[in-house]
Image: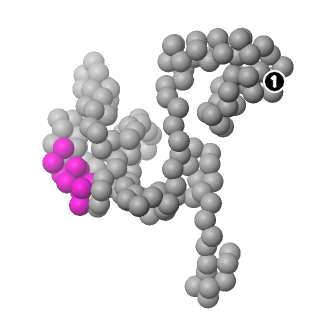
Amino acid sequence: MDRILELLQKDAKQSAARIAVMLGMEEAAVAAKIKEYEENGTILAYRAILNDEKLDCAPVRALIEIRVMPYKGHGFEKVARHISQYEEVRSVSLMSGGFDLCAEVDGDNMRDVALFVAEKLAVIDGVMGTTTHFVLRKYKDEGVFYKFEEKDERGNTL
């Protein structure tokens, strides 16, 4: 992978000037390369990774495994794109194993996620079955470790 992309992936707030110094390049060349990556779709977005435990109203997140009957000539694409259109869906991935797709879904509470599965996901043509796993706590996301102090049952800091 290009070093510019590696550096941006670790910290998207880095300026072209800073990256240029780190790589021994001209700032204009780095800025042009970043613009090219944005225009050709290599860089899709810049996002902040939030610690849900620090938010007043953290979403309930679920990973939903989906078994799909692939469409002739379209494979899993048609169902995956349909699922991707819903606002609740953060990501959809084709996967190997006992299920075909995995969707990461947010809701205000567990009931919202359950209703999404029952009323929107399960009724899609081609969806044969689902299994829902609720995320209880994240320890690392997108390569970033969450910072929090834990205590064991005796009250000692770990």
Q: Which residue is drawn at 62% across and 18% down?
A: 34
**Rendered location of residue 43, percent (x, y):** 54, 23
Is residue 68 among the parts visible in the rendering?
A: no
- Residue toward you, 53 or 18: 18
10 lies above or below 58: above
Dot 1 falls on a residue whose secondary structure is helix
- Residue toward you, 15 or 85: 15
Tell me the amino acid under the disc marked 1. Val
* Most common SS among magenta residues: helix
Q: Residue at x 62, y 48 (%)?
A: 144
Where on the picture, by quarter, is residue 56?
Answer: bottom left
- Count residues near mark 1 (Cα–Cα under 10 Å), then give few for <14, some for 14-19, many for 20+: few
**Rendered location of residue 158, percent (x, y):** 68, 75
- Residue toward you, 74 or 114: 114
Stretch of the chain drawn in magenta: 111-120
Q: Which residue is drawn at 67% across and 83% down?
A: 156
**Rendered location of residue 22, percent (x, y):** 81, 27
Dot 1 corresponds to which residue?
Answer: 21
Q: Is residue 91 left or right of residue 30?
A: left
Q: Which residue is drawn at 22% across and 44% down?
A: 121
